[in-house]
Amino acid sequence: SRLTWDYMKNELDNEVESFASQYLVDSTRKAGAIVKFTDDLLDAAEVPWQSVSPFGSYYAIWDLAYGTEDENAKNKPCLSSGGVWLKDNNNRLILVESISGYFNTDEKIGEAVAGPMSRYPLQYTAIEDANGMRWLEREIKRCAEAVGVKNPAIIYLKVDKAENAKRRRIALIPSLMEQKLMVISDACVGKEFVREQLSKYTGKKRSPRDVADMFGLTAIHLGGHMPLPVEEMSESEYGKKVKVVQERAMREILFPTMDDVVYEQALVEETVINYF
């Protein structure tokens, strides 16, 4: 019998360790297991931007929190972490941009979440469904409209809040990286910060885990989707899509942050919106 997405999603939601063992062929992900993101693993997870196909769908995944970068704080400051992921026709999840920061106002969170909405043809923005996050939707939509995006699609991800649930989600990531199902573009904006945060993850309470959990949320939410249908288009349309990807990758290589990049609105509207 054929495995369906509904069946796979149910298996993943109910028992992460069994899912890793049976469907990822990985018996090492025990309950509460600690994983290490070694340099070798992270190096192998990087892919050349030239190999990133223009076909696929873009999604933004967010683990949001209020927080200030206060080293004197009693508890570890809360970092908000978001990622723009491209799901290609080979079922790979490719991180093309990472956005992280300590946001202490609704407006700062709204601006951070709205930013990728104006830069990518997102299918939707998915936010971890935590206390208070739904109250931010009005501010996010206000910030989105300020950058030219009306009525953005926003969904909320219900996640397991049980003990070790976050650790179990994160434990899925190495297997996906090793199988090239979850990778990072070498032109990814914010790549170095992602590597730094993942390499510092130890599973302990005070170790950085927000970026790792954003990866975990992505693995849970997007990791089992069925392959996208291959689009039929002319060579000229294909060439335009390739050109968009190449131009964007070159900008990301030349400029260390998105703040330094000035996007021509005409280019974005003509090439990205019309052809994605």
Image (cartoon, helix red, strand yellow):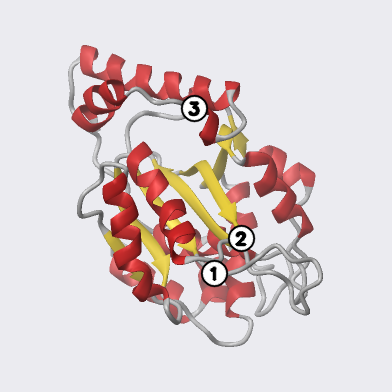
Name the residue: 43% across, 52% down: 111
Tell me the quarter of the image containing the C terminus: top left
Name the residue: 29% across, 21% down: 267
Q: Position of residue 17 (x, y in %)?
A: 58, 74
Disc 3, disc 1: CB below 8 Å? no
Residue type beneath disc 1: Ala
Name the residue: 76% across, 68% down: 207
Horizontal side of 90 relative to 69 (left or right) equals left
- Say which label, 3 or 2, has the lower sequence index: 2
Which SS class for mark 2?
loop
Q: Position of residue 4 (x, y in %)?
A: 29, 64
Q: Which sits in the foreground, 151 or 211?
A: 151
Q: Mark 3 points at which residue?
A: 261
- Say which label, 3 or 1, has the lower sequence index: 1
Name the residue: 57% across, 40% down: 184
Q: How crowded is mark 2: few (under 14 residues within 10 Å), some or many (20 or more)?
A: some
Residue type beneath disc 3: Val
Q: Which sits in the foreground, 131 or 94?
A: 131
Q: Mark 2 points at which residue?
A: 102
Could you give the CA–CA distance between mark 3 and mark 1, rounded to whole angstroms?
Answer: 26 Å
> Quick check: 192 above or below 205?
above
Residue 65: mark: 1
Could you give the CA–CA distance between mark 2 and mark 1, rounded to whole angstroms?
Answer: 8 Å
Which SS class for mark 3?
loop
Residue 206 quadrant: bottom right
> Quick check: 9 above or below 261?
below
